[in-house]
Amino acid sequence: MKILHIAPIKIGRVSDEDTLDIFPGMQADGPTRSVLGLSLGLCDWECEVGVLSTRPLTEEAIRHFGGIKMLTPIAAQAKTPYISAVGWVDAIESEFGKPDLVNFHDVYDFAQCAIAREIKRRGWIYTVTPRGGLRKIPQKRSFLKKKLANMLFFSQFLRNAAFITALCAAEKQDIAEFDSQLTDIIVAPNGIAESVVNGYSEMARKTDSDTPLMLGYIGQFDVEIKGLDLLFGAFRRLKNEGRLQNVKLVLAGQFKARNKKMARQSQDEVASFIHEMAESGHLEMKGPVFGNNKWSMLADMDVFVLTSRTEGMPVAVLEAMAFQRPCLVTEGTNMAQFVADHDAGWACETTAEAIYWQLRNVLATARSDMKKKGKNAQDAVRGTYLWPLSAKLYLDGVTRILSQSGVEPRFNSK
């Protein structure tokens, strides 16, 4: 089966340093990890997989993508994508041939929208993976601008797809509510590379009761989406009650500049929290961490915390669980039930009050019990979310849709 993924791939400087990442140069970008991870998983089922990046990629980076056919990237977002689309699709045919399926990753990208219109004209089949972009909170941002853009361009882009691919059941429901005409929706979750699960080994620090309990977060400093204000509120309350002896919260990440107003609000919220925690020793702020720096931070923490209001499916939680880190997650992460079912941490409603009480439970948990929860977390990820397993779920859904279109996909496990 021949599948082409089109996505904004972001790869940083490539070095010769050994890393557990699926490819060198991976940055804090969930969609890039997901697209390349899914592509590798599909290769394990003997699919012919191509990737077209709508962002520039260096030749040095492209050479590392073994098993995946990397097409010549679209060097920059053209000012006239609807004029350029014919040439782009001609280039796809020249380099890769006609795919059985094209998978667009993202919604609000005019280059992808233009390519979709051209491949639809040629009778090709495509799907769109919105990656959380159609969920309720993201749709509220720049509401009027998105409403107009949907009417003029993107609703048709979505409706012309053979089906939509959601990352979880909650996102599937939001997509159906976003547009009642989007009736064919499959669910194909994110996954994790086996190298991450196997690479945990002895990297975790040796801790004892005198070592500060480290609660960690790695991700975007997007206060609304990531629910950082909820986490801050709960943490403030614990500090005011004197419950944070020998406890440290470590936050690593960066602010997204795409929406300057939202970025400023996030910066103000984070700055206020830093000011309140100054000189207390309970907070440490870091910039974005990549590669082995990220894995070292995961290995150092006792509990990974993600209190998001909304997610597609957070790769960060999968990575933490793969590293035997128990997780405190809210329902908004879409991982709460999974964590609870496998006794892999603590799950709660998406409120500051619920987070506060679960943080109290974390602080009351013995280190030995945390390690048991961490082992449960790794076992759960290994049995459910390795990329070949996620790729099989994807293929099951794809096969059903393509068979209805007269295409008989063939794939076999290696």
Image (cartoon, grey):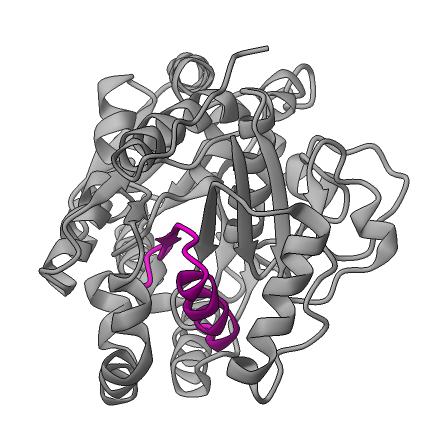
State whether residue 231 is above or below residue 86: above
* Residue located 41% across and 75% down the image: 266
Residue projecting furthest to the right: 16
* Quadrant assignment for the C terminus: top right
Q: Is residue 70 visible?
A: yes
Residue 379 vs residue 400: left or right? right
Q: Horizontal and vertical percent for residue 29?
A: 56, 54
Residue 407 vs residue 84: left or right? left
Let me know if residue 116 is in the magenta part: yes
In the foreground, 173 or 180: 180
Residue 52 picture quarter: bottom right
State whether residue 223 is above or below residue 239: below
Residue 199 picture quarter: top right
Q: Is residue 326 visible?
A: no
Question: Exactly how many numbered labels are in the figure?
Answer: 0
Residue 147 picture quarter: bottom left
* Residue located 47% across and 40% down the image: 100
Q: Horizontal and vertical percent for residue 92?
A: 64, 56
Q: Horizontal and vertical percent for residue 110?
A: 47, 77
Q: Horizontal and vertical percent for residue 194?
A: 59, 21
Let me know if residue 37 is in the magenta part: no
Residue 389 vs residue 168: left or right? right
In the foreground, 53 or 349: 53
* Residue located 64% across and 63% down the image: 90
* Residue located 29% across and 17% down the image: 342
In the foreground, 392 or 278: 392
State which region is magenta: 109-133
